[in-house]
Amino acid sequence: MPKPAIVCHGGAGHGARDQPGVEEATSLGWTLLQQGDSALDAALAAVVMMENDPFLNAGTGGRIRADGSIQLDAAVMTSDGRFGAVTCIEQTKNPILVAAKLLDEQVNMLAGRGAREFADSINVPRDEVEGSPQSTGNDTVGVIVRDQSGLIVVASSTGGCTGRPAGRIGDTPLIGAGIWCDEYVGISATGIGEAITLKMSSLRIADRVSSGGGLSDALKWGVEQFNSDIEVGFIGLSSQGDGVGIANTKMPWASKS
Ligand code: ASP
């Protein structure tokens, strides 16, 4: 029987102050897995906890855009071939729950007004999102879970990078760039979204794992593709073994198995 495991990160550039929030989310997901909950339920619960953590700043405390708006991105991908994402959604404290509802729809990605109207249709309440009190920095939280059936689920949520224009889409909700999951491995990225998107990092790291490379080496290779002045980090979890996190900057992360 596959061994359950979870790995979470709280964003490249975040320091030790944010480690407790990441550990709490990891413990919550782990407790659910131990109770026999699915990888999807455990991953969503862990992301929601981090979206609600004012220090981690995805969801509730998302970064403020250049025009003063708060527009959030979130995505979920599963090893059985499903994907759901929302981008630039407003008035939504937990965008990950909206992204997850797209996993079983024909449409797998919605932006802006359409994303919010879909949220209305599934009774996700409209709430004003407070926004991050910090004026600089980036935000993303990511979780990867493997359950006892062997299903792997990756879920990521972000307020983006500070001061980007309204409508800007970073790597987080882009399949292959900020998120990837197949039967071999799940990857979640964090850092400067435009740079990560250009390198299609998550898919290229995953390809190295599916062609026989070790997970730590593949993640290290992914980080090495960037100049050191571009903050990036990745977590990964394969079909066996423990979760791993690697970054070229501070990145709170935690795993349990
Ligand atoms: N990658 C995110 C974005 O560019 C931000 C981050 O992870 O720090 O939207």
Image (cartoon, rainbow, N blue to C red):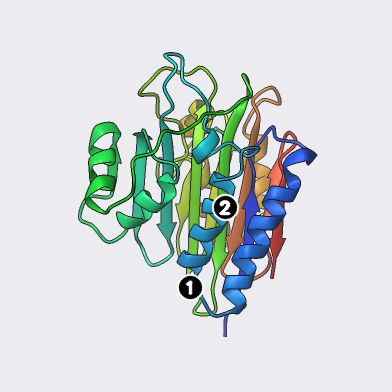
Residue at x 29%, y 44% (from the top left corner): 109
User: For the view shown, which residue lies furthest in the bottom direction?
Assistant: 1
Instruction: From the image, tell me which residue sits under label 1.
Output: 38
In this rendering, the answer to whether 165 lies above or below 242 is: above
SS category of the residue bearing label 2: helix
Mark positioned earlier in the residue sequence (2 or 1): 1
Question: Dot 2, crowdedness within 10 Å: few (<14), some or many (≥20)?
Answer: some
Labels 2, 1: front one: 2
Question: How far across and how far down the image is residue 26, in percent?
Answer: 66, 59
The quadrant of the rendering that contains the C terminus is bottom right
Instruction: From the image, tell me which residue sits under label 2.
Output: 49
The quadrant of the rendering that contains the N terminus is bottom right
Question: How far across and how far down the image is residue 49, in percent?
Answer: 57, 52
The one nearer the camera, 224 or 145, is 145
Residue at x 57%, y 44% (from the top left corner): 141
The one nearer the camera, 19 or 104, is 19
**Is the CB atom of the residue marked by disc 2 within 8 angstroms of ligand 1's nearest atom?**
no
Work out whether residue 185 can be spotted: no
Quarter for ligand 1? top right
